[in-house]
Amino acid sequence: MPLTEAQPFVLGKVHSRVKFLVGNKTDIPKILLIKLGAVGELVMASPFFDQLRKHFPHSEIVLVVGRSSYAAVEHNPNINRFILTDDLDLYHGGLIRRSLEFFRLIFKLRKEEFDLSFVLQRAIAFRLLSCLVGVPVRVGFGRGRKDLFLTHSVSNHQIQNESESYLDLLRKLDIPAAFEKTFYYLSDEEKEFMDLFLERHSIASGEQVVAVAPGGGESAKRTMLTRRWPVQNFIELIQRLQRERSSRVILVGGPGDREITNHIIQISPDCLDATDLSFGDMASVLRRCNLFIGNDSAPHHIAASMGIPSIGIFGPTDPHQWAPLDQNSSVVIKPVECHPCFIDETFPKCSHIRCLTSVTVDDVWQQLESALPSLKK
């Protein structure tokens, strides 16, 4: 049953002391969110943050987030405060470093006295964290033993888009939540950056501008090379855009994409290199673009949240789960017998990458003309 401002919102089990009035300034819960992940995952979680704030407009909402992806949410008005954690230590550090960071979080969070927590991470360690800090009502994804460390568990077996999965955490508490769009918020300075960039590169108001993300960030460089469409295909696509559509091409990404970007610019020197921009400045520039084309990566999610037509080239990962749900976003994929191979958050070694090499430039071009008819002659 949908909740209204007049309906008591009772959380927890039968004897829970936690009772709130949705939308009311009395008995306001203090809410803890735990979501580390990559930048793209935080953009996918943005509809959850938006819906949570709509139903708890007066609550203090605190997000535990990794230092490496904090930039994706630092200007989100739905979050009151952030608690930063060293996600590199938690995910890649040795036992001692992981343990020290984990216990540092426990001691810090126990001082806060939260009433309600949403654990958007699937790893059991973060469910345990929510329990150890004394949060009486804990909502998260079940894995293994269904309700271990949680008071409200959402099934983790159904394959669906991640944005919908996050919204399921609200639905578990009978809070109505419907996907509308994803969000990426800019600071005032970042909003102004677009005009500076356009002036610096003499981009006229009537020019067609296409953003291309040929890499995939540091994660793709380290462990997910199979998420990259072959660079030669990107070069052929860019040359076709410049030749047949007179488009200005901006190469976007991060520091981990410099090598592949430099290779493209050597062959197509008219491309603009924007891989030195912060995520916020890149998002600002994307607002001016007529189209985005790239791999399954953070820039794809940011572009979709900026409202421009976006084409994602998918291979090993499942677009049903990981592609943006935004109406302006589309995907190109050629499923093969081993697709998807993103299982248990690891990629197996792959010697053929048929899922990506089978996607041709013509396949992407056909999607391009469908996504952006204005590019037609």
Image (cartoon, grey):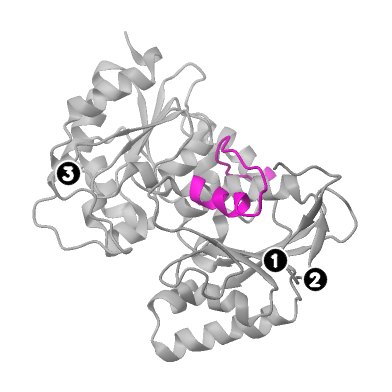
Can see residue 34? no
User: What predominant SS class does the magenta segment belong to?
Assistant: loop
In the image, which residues are magenta?
A: 164-188
Q: Are marks 2 and 1 in contact (CB under 8 Å)?
A: yes
The Cα atoms of the two marked residues, 1 and 3, are separated by: 45 Å
**Rendered view: 311 above or below 70:** above
| Residue lying furthest front | 14
List x then y, in percent, for residue 246.
32, 18
Q: Earlier in the sequence, mark 1 or mark 3?
A: 1
Alpha-carbon neighbours of circle 2 within 10 Å: few (<14), some, or many (≥20)? few
**Rendered view: 145 above or below 238:** below
Q: In the picture, which quadrant includes the C terminus?
A: top left
Q: Which residue is mark 2?
A: 17
Q: Secondary structure at mark 1?
A: loop
Q: Quadrant of residue 83?
A: bottom right
Q: Which residue is mark 1?
A: 12
- In the image, which disc is placed on residue 355? 3
Which label lies toward us, 1 or 3? 1
Can see residue 292? yes
Q: In the picture, which quadrant includes the N terminus?
A: top right
Q: Residue at x 45, y 51 (%)?
A: 40
Q: Residue at x 41, y 21 (%)?
A: 208
Q: Quadrant of residue 14?
A: bottom right
| Kind of residue sitting beneath label 2 | Arg
Q: Earlier in the sequence, mark 2 or mark 1?
A: 1
List x then y, in percent, for residue 94.
38, 86
| Kind of residue sitting beneath label 3 | Cys
The Cα atoms of the two marked residues, 2 and 1, are separated by: 8 Å
Q: Earlier in the sequence, mark 2 or mark 3?
A: 2
